[in-house]
Image: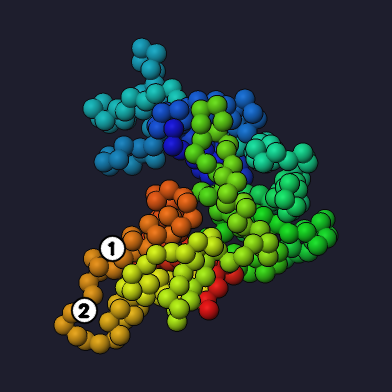
Amino acid sequence: MSVNLPALLLRLTEGGEPVLLHGVTDEPPGTASGIRRLLEQGVLEQQPALTTWDPCPNCDCGATERAIRWHDGRPIAVCPVNADSDTPLSLETLRVYRVSLAGFAGQIAGALDLRDQPEEVVPCLWRLGRLEAGPIALLATSSAAVSRPGTIERLNALDSGARFILIGAIASASERAALAASGIGVVLPEDAFLPSEPTQPIRINRTRFETAVPGADPPLLTFNRLGFLVTFHGVPVQLGPRDFRVLFVLVREANDGGAAARRDDLHRELTGGSEAADQVGDEQIDKSINRIRTALCDAAGIPRSEGTKLIVTVRKHGYRLDIPGERIRID
């Protein structure tokens, strides 16, 4: 089972209440078992099953939905004009679950070994409790919750002088940097949780929490251009001259608001802006990015598959180093 159920549920909560999960299957294997476990834990609440289905994908009858009929104990989405377009369904795909945000927050707090009772301090923002290391864990079931006027003041009133770690889909590096300046470190949902297991659908990635506390840790990445030295998690990163220059562009953009490095900028850095015949091609840049990903993962002692999270491909644009600017030091 490789699905990350809590991250999936947090993506659904962005749409607002009610938070519904439709048509659960067992792909990948074990998903259905994880859903049953979430039902037992009170994170999900089963709702009445669907009685209608989407219209035929290629039908021009004008119907906005199809009725569901039962034949030999199996549900079928019936096309009103063409029986050949009838779609056999499984019982599982008709099931609908509602997410209990209070139950969800409670189970995440339990997975973090917190003893406090989760509290919704403002709509869609939950105080989960104090971590053993000292910071207060927060959960945002809407990424907009933490940016509402008065929210940070409310948090500081509850826990004066505390630092916070927020689980939330704050995609913008500049927003994460602004929160860090206010004492709130951010862990993205896909990083906060480990892949679900059938009997343990909510599993915490504690390593990510250890590096998210604002002001508590040294820079994740240091870059010394003159000394030709890069460290990640305090470990020297071994890079060739070309890869070092590519990383410099990524670091520069990440440190300046978290923007993606455009391919044009990477080409310009590697060619000195010249129009020489030996221009660097996209394939060479892509290979360089992959080598940098590998080197960073090896330095941090994490699986190389995590490299695509450290350097994110921005389609039709370039690459973005996904390290908050406040965790980068350029010497």
Q: Residue furthest left?
A: 277
Q: Quadrant where the N terminus lies?
A: top left
State the image coordinates of residue 238 (x, y, percent, origin top left).
Answer: 39, 64
Q: Is residue 216 left or right of residue 160?
A: left
Task: Say what secondary structure mark 1 lies in.
Answer: helix
- Please, is residue 3 above or below residue 314 in the view? above
> Within 10 Å of the Cα at label 1, are there few (<14), some (14-19), or many (20+) other Cα atoms?
few
Please give the label number shown on residue 287: 1
- Please, is residue 116 above or below residue 67 in the view? below
Q: Amino acid at mark 1?
A: Lys
Taking depth in this image into account, of 60 and 299 the one nearest to the observer is: 299
Residue at 48% across, 35% down:
22
Visible residue check, residue 79: yes
State the image coordinates of residue 292 (x, y, percent, origin top left).
Answer: 37, 63
- Please, is residue 327 above or below residue 85 in the view? below
- Quarter-of-image position of residue 262: bottom left
Residue at 67% across, 41% down:
112
- Please, is residue 53 above or below residue 317 in the view? above
State the image coordinates of residue 214 (x, y, percent, origin top left).
Answer: 66, 63
Between the residue at mark 1 and the residue at mark 2, the CA separation in whole angstroms equals: 15 Å
- Quarter-of-image position of residue 244: bottom left
Taking depth in this image into account, of 240 and 305 the one nearest to the observer is: 240
Q: Is residue 308 left or right of residue 267?
A: right
Task: Say what secondary structure mark 2 lies in.
Answer: loop
- Quarter-of-image position of residue 77: top left
Visible residue check, residue 258: no
Please give the label number shown on residue 279: 2
> Within 10 Å of the Cα at label 2, are there few (<14), some (14-19), or many (20+) other Cα atoms?
some
State the image coordinates of residue 281 (x, y, percent, origin top left).
Answer: 22, 72
N-terminal-most mark, 1 or 2: 2
Q: Amino acid at mark 2?
A: Gln
Please give the label number shown on residue 258: none
